[in-house]
Amino acid sequence: MELMNNNRWESYIRRVTPYVPGEQPKDESIIKLNTNENPYPPAPGVERVLRNIDVDRLRLYPDPTIGLLVDELASFYELDKDQVFVGVGSDDVLANAFLTFFNSDKPIIFPDITYSFYPVYCDLYRIPYEIQPLDKEFRIVKEDYYKDNGGVVIANPNAPTSVYEEISIIEDIVSHNPNSVVIVDEAYIDFAGESALSLVSKYENLLVVQTFSKSRSMAGMRIGYAMGSKKLIKALNDVKYSINSYTLNQASILAGVEGVRDWEYYNEKIQNILDVRNESEKEFRRLGFSFPKSGANFLFVTHASIPAKDLYEALKENKIYVRYFDLPRIDNYLRVTIGKKEEMDKLFDFLSKYIESK
Ligand code: PMP
């Protein structure tokens, strides 16, 4: 039978320009400084529970409430369990939050340079948005967030800039927005300073989103969470249960619990990363790079004379992956994850020789 070409289904497809994640190369000899993963393994308890997983239990669906992990997070952060929502990475939590809270006709607002997933969610869910330019130092201009809006999203520390804003700036923005939900995406907060979590008891419209992917070394398990008032968490759960009740698998729930418990272990690893970050800052400066002060496990660097794109390509050819964004205002920057000292040494060895040869 001849295929008819006049079907309308194609025009009914929801089209979206997707987010492009950083590369996950198979070659293990590659030095991977491109997706802000933690260079150290998860806490020992994570390995223990994964080795002892009851495979027969996998016949059953996991707990749709993710109760064990919700309880563990609630007690760690001294919240009520009705104030915690867990999802499949903070990307999933953010996607649910955009769908749940940004349902007005007014544009939501976020910085021009920020996590590039935000405009993708807006596009997917048909949420209007207006970007607010960061200043020349990549800092938030807080007055830009005083205007009428349908919601506010702030990544703090911001990505890919690495800039951390003090909690007073965040509180100022939240207090000027009593009519909108304000989402603070704190994927990197454990490398920075004070979390906006302390404001959650004061502002019912503030949602703080965090992840197990960075400071807790578990990007591969895909666990993220949101904390806020009971009203916000109930609304998020209502949307979640309208899409997929069983979001976290059994292994992730058990591993996640161990990931919350052993903060002493993680704190030590965070300190290691901050030490290597300090050393790396010196090396980058010595080689002619500049960068904003980082509050994250990465640096956002630009070189005085060599274009970022050339550096990115030369590094890649030499099996060192960093992240480059061909986007307005940041197309001469590289986002470099802080790896282990040995990995950073190799990066700086290569950069020294390359820059000398120019
Ligand atoms: N927010 C920001 C600012 C990020 O950089 C990332 C990591 N790409 C995420 C959220 C998502 O992290 P995950 O889904 O692994 O929790």
Image (cartoon, rainbow, N blue to C red):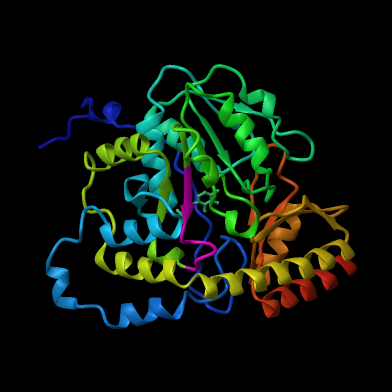
| Residue 308 in view (yes/no) | yes
Compared to residue 114, the image places residue 317 above or below, namely: below
Which residue: 14% across, 35% down?
2
Q: Quarter of the image holding residue 101? A: top left
Say which of 88 and 306 sits in front: 88
Expressed as whole percent of the image width and height from the top left, the position of residue 13 reads 29, 32
- Whether residue 316 appears in magenta in the rendering, the answer is no
- Total labels: the figure holds 0
Expressed as whole percent of the image width and height from the top left, the position of residue 23 reads 52, 60
Residue 237 in the figure: left or right of residue 232: left
Predominant secondary structure, magenta span = loop
Which residue: 84% across, 73% down?
353
Compared to residue 106, the image places residue 251 above or below, namely: below
In magenta, the rendered stretch is 208-217
| Residue 31 in view (yes/no) | no
Say which of 11 and 175 sits in front: 175
Residue 59 in the figure: left or right of residue 169: left
Tell me the quarter of the image containing the C terminus.
bottom right
Tell me the quarter of the image containing the N terminus.
top left
Expressed as whole percent of the image width and height from the top left, the position of residue 48 reads 35, 82
Which residue: 30% across, 64% down?
253
Expressed as whole percent of the image width and height from the top left, the position of residue 92 reads 38, 48
- Whether residue 215 appears in magenta in the rendering, the answer is yes
Q: Which residue lies furthest to the left in this view?
A: 1
Which residue: 41% across, 54% down?
224
Compared to residue 234, the image places residue 320 above or below, namely: below
